[in-house]
Image: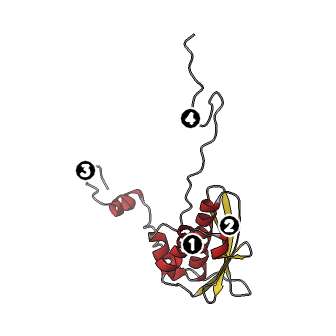
Amino acid sequence: MSMAEEINTLEELGQAAGLEAAPEVVETPREPVRDDLGRSYATGKRKDAVARVWIKPGSGKVTVNGKPQNDYFARPVLQMILAQPFSVSGTEGQFDVVATVKGGGLSGQAGAVKHGISKALQLYDPSLRGALKAAGFLTRDSRVVERKKYGKAKARKSFQFSKR
């Protein structure tokens, strides 16, 4: 090709440079990830809380740190947070959940268990990934407490200013 000829597309540019066309990317379907007992496992995180979550087909029983969900998370709002992944994916009452959670407060722990349930659900049945991802349940909420800086009373609060 001479300099006078125009190149209008990326393919023409590639041909002019002597490159071959890029191979087509083929997405392989995701495989379910389950252990020998038919469970899926995932870790969930929120604030300082870390949850280990196992799900398996069952009657919808949720156990957190060896206690029933209603005993561990007494506030209805926290119980609602744990139910969100199941309602979004349309699998209410189909899975038993066993979770161990450490660190943080109750709100952070509920968010961590929710994140773990969502990740375990999409590992158990990859077809649920679209609904869970659209709802934003597979993304770890990265908001954490801001650290204290030197020369400051707290993270942002300054010491009282004295002119004299």
Q: Using the numbered discs, state the Cα–Cα distance from disc 4 to disc 1 in whole angstroms.
A: 34 Å
Q: Earlier in the sequence, mark 3 or mark 2?
A: 3
Q: Using the numbered discs, state the Cα–Cα distance from disc 3 to disc 2 in whole angstroms.
A: 64 Å
- Which label lies toward us, 1 or 2? 1
Q: Which residue is mark 3?
A: 4
Image height of 119 relative to 95, above or below: above
Task: Look at label 3 and name its amino acid.
Answer: Ala
Residue 156: image tag: 4
Between 118 and 159, the one nearer to me in the picture: 159
Task: Look at label 4 and name its amino acid.
Answer: Arg
Where on the picture, by quarter, is residue 34?
bottom right
Image height of 59 relative to 65, above or below: below
- Which label lies toward us, 3 or 1? 1
**Label 3 Cα crowd, 10 Å radius (few <14 / some 14-19 / many 20+):** few
Q: Secondary structure at mark 1?
A: helix
**Residue 151: x and y, percent?**
64, 27
Q: Secondary structure at mark 3?
A: loop
Q: Earlier in the sequence, mark 2 or mark 4?
A: 2
Q: Which residue is mark 1?
A: 79
Residue 51: image tag: 2
- Residue 120 located left or right of residue 21: right
Where on the picture, by quarter, is residue 122?
bottom right
Task: Look at label 2 and name its amino acid.
Answer: Ala
Task: Look at label 1 and name its amino acid.
Answer: Gln
Q: Using the numbered discs, state the Cα–Cα distance from disc 4 to disc 3 in whole angstroms.
A: 62 Å
